[in-house]
Amino acid sequence: MPGNDRSVDTVVREVCAACGRDPTRMLDIVRGVQRRLGWVPEEAVDRIAAETGAPRAEVAGVVSFYAFFADRPQGRIVIRLCEDVIDKLHGAERVAEALVEELGVGFDETTPDGLFTLAWTPCIGMSDQAPAALVDDVVITRLSRDRARQMVRELRGHGDPHRLVRTWGDGNNAHPLVRAMVENNIRHAGPVVLDGFERGRALEHALRMSPIEVIREIKIARLRGRGGAGFPTGMKWEFTRAAPGERKVVICNADEGEPGTFKDRVILTERADLMLEGLTVAAYAIGADEGIVYLRGEYAYLLALLEDAIERRRRDGLLGRRILGRDGFDFDIRVQLGAGAYMCGEETGLIASCEGRRGDAKNRPPFPAQQGYLGRPTSVNNVETLCCAARIVERGAGWFAGFGTKDSTGTKLFSVSGDCRRPGVYELPFGTTLGELLERAGADDIGAVQVGGPSGRMVGRDALERRLSFEDLPTGGSVMVFDTSRDPLWIVDEFMRFFVEESCGFCTPCRVGNVVMHDAVRKVRAGQASAADVERLRALAGTVRTASRCGLGQTSPNPVLSSLDAFPERWRRELRPARRDDLLPTFDPRAALRAAELLAGRSSTVFPPGEEDAR
Amino acid sequence: MSGTVTITVDGREIETREGRTILQACDEAGVWIPRLCAHPELSVYGSCRVCTCLVDGRAAAACVQPVRHGMVVESDSERVNELRRTIVELLFVEGNHFCMVCEKSGDCELQALAYRLGITHPRFAYMFPERPVDAGHPDLMLDHDRCVMCGRCVRAAAELDGKPELGFLGRGIHRRVGADGGAGLAGTALRGDDRVATICPTGALLRKRVGYRTPYGRRRFDHAPIGSAAAAGDGEER
Ligand SMILES: Cc1cc2nc3c(=O)[nH]c(=O)nc-3n(C[C@H](O)[C@H](O)[C@H](O)COP(=O)(O)O)c2cc1C
Ligand code: SF4
Ligand code: SF4
Ligand code: FES
Ligand code: FES
């Protein structure tokens, strides 16, 4: 939709004015400017800085941080093909070839007519209907070569990505505000999150209790965060409530960036009200007057639905001033759209992003509960966690704790994808075994399973009896299945590339260490590594895990470390034996001498040709 | 914020005050912890991780972590120094550091740390990135090849010189210091006599025409390793 008919100056002025010239709204401003101009030229950066009073260096820093912002001209339509492993095992590379052929340009390039830019993007949360792509904000699922070609031809004709969607998915995917071809793929609806919900019920229950009692109820239910780390939610709320500060903030983390996770997508589509109610209950318990839903840019297609749900709640007195008539309970919610950065799922990166800044992680301490969004005590909670909280208040802590295990109460939404017949969302009690889940999903041939996404762990068949829970095999939701034909080392290679691309680069171990680890994995795969290389890799992985500043770097070595644990034989098979002549086993003197021999016009006397090197 | 607390660093008891970081407490007590991004005139940052210690058995950056009474810190041990060695090696392979032709040699904190930690060569392959030099400013020069992303310049310009004109661009391994939003140093109001001109620990951000005033052989780290002055109780080193 970009048109260059308006001057940069006018566009920036209008967009900034619509955002109150507020530098904390920088993501919305940059997005707005890009929508109108097609990209963000330097002149626009200047003008944004002038309008908002933010330093120019900071504006440029933001534009360069997010994958969805362009500091170079790009096509009028941007096609981003999901490059996740799951998409690749469903043929994303063949789709890529077709796109390249049809468009006549490669990835990260723009067609000469300025119509298309082609790019790869990490998991867009559609692993259950892969291969998938984003065409601007429009999600296209189940791509094939032919469909990809057809898509490009059509777009050349009408230029409107929305018209590519002819059939709508189930449930709210067909809602007039969504109209997406996305399928929910709810394979099993459990009693907690995916059960039916009547708007306002949980909040009514909450208001019959004092805020302290609400927190106590959450604690009795032993609710733990569903976003990955598993921190006790009641404690988090209590800290935030107790922290000194006039104004407090609750944030819903709907960034869902961990590859292979798509359960929050389904909750946002079908149970947005339950999540919003959970956020409002959290606000009541904590004493917050401000709420933010941080929605990943990939889910922009759900923005209108979400904003509509918020607006209805305002109309019904469930948001705004004097909620349900309670004096002093004032609370409202805004949605902050992300712009393509896994890092912004990490809570301090997320807060920075909400403040209109780069998604670099922040130092801890101070923790968000002490000083978060704009220095205010802030509680960041996952979408599913908030749904659970609302249910606990509605139906009681005892009821909730009746599901699951001692240390992992309640149910969990698992997103299963990969080599299985029934990929999708399964809401099952914590403590369900991995084998049971995979049986339900129709995974008959199991080689490796990635539990918890790239930052989780890779396990083999011997883990099928293990229980999905915080105390045994934890996952934020992602469960990727790979059959016996898939190479674990290929998976590790792909995951390490993901971390290299997504590291914010603030700290040394994560910024540089991931690149070195990825190179080492590729060296192994190329058959050029020895046991010593792997030991060095293992040691480096330990250092990155220990010394990184945030969760991204602290978990990025996991593909290497867990696959070394689960598939040591697979690693060993690729290794070169040590050499008898004490040279590095990866050093091929004959190959190294070749160029010099050619130049000199004679052969080496130390390593004469024909003589096999003395390994 | 003025309560007295005692922490133990490598077996030695240090008395300090609440609100201090481990690094500050150790500096005041003459116990040196290696560091790169931390600087006494600048806000806390925590990017290089060279100051990593084991605090009650868990890794933490000494320049970020506030002291707590009874805290036990392990700093100058083989396993901690091995961690630091790896980090410093990563910084070397990430950039292009040709010390023999670098005007900062002998005065460079990165080089000095490498010597002090006993690094003779990195165990990882050099990345040889291509990074252009920004030499357009009359009095300053930014050689990105030698940048370790410590952010000292970014903070000094904003916090000490009141000119928030430096910032980071890009992310991950593509991260780089951007002056004037990327246009270059020449477009900024930064001057050769600003504090930022001499804040860089390496030879990345340099003042022009002064590089060889102190000849090789008579520079800060030519005679005693980095950290010696602090440990000898001569106060702040730098
Ligand atoms: C790199 C990284 C990415 C993350 N992405 C997400 C995410 O997309 N969604 C999420 O809920 N939590 C994510 N987290 C975890 C959050 O930092 C945080 O722990 C969580 O949102 C807290 O909510 P919870 O207690 O309800 O789980 C991520 C963490 C890291 C280190
Ligand atoms: S900046 Fe320091 S480490 Fe880098 S080349 Fe110069 S002297 Fe050597
Ligand atoms: S230029 Fe120097 S001070 Fe600035 S970030 Fe790079 S190494 Fe640090
Ligand atoms: S950049 Fe995030 S952990 Fe280092
Ligand atoms: S000195 Fe502490 S992280 Fe750099």
Image (spheres, coloured by chain):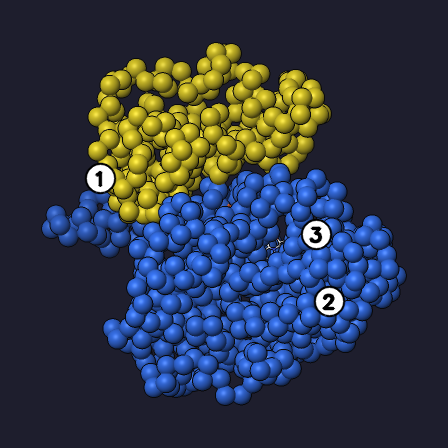
Chain colours: A blue, B yellow
Q: Amino acid at mark 3?
A: Ala
Query: Of the residues tagged 1 and 3, which is closer to the observer?
Result: 3
Q: Quadrant of the N terminus of chain A?
A: bottom left
- Chain for numbered disc 3: A
> Residue B44: x and y, percent?
52, 33
Q: For residue B136, which numbered disc appears in the image?
A: 1
With respect to residue B95, does A158 lie above or below? below
| Residue at the disc numbered 3 | A288
The chain holding disc 1 is B
Q: Is residue A212 above or below residue A273?
A: above
- Left/right placement of residue A375 relative to residue A114 reads right
Q: What residue lies at 48% left-to-right and 42% top-to-bottom?
A: A507
Quadrant assignment, res B74: top right
Question: Relative to the observer, which residue lies in front, A557 or A600?
Answer: A557
Q: Which mark is residue A317?
A: 2
Residue A439 position within the rendered picture, expressed as x and y whole percent measured from the top left: 70, 75
Seen from the viewer's position, the closer of residues A119 and A15 is A15
Q: Are marks 1 and 2 on the same chain?
A: no
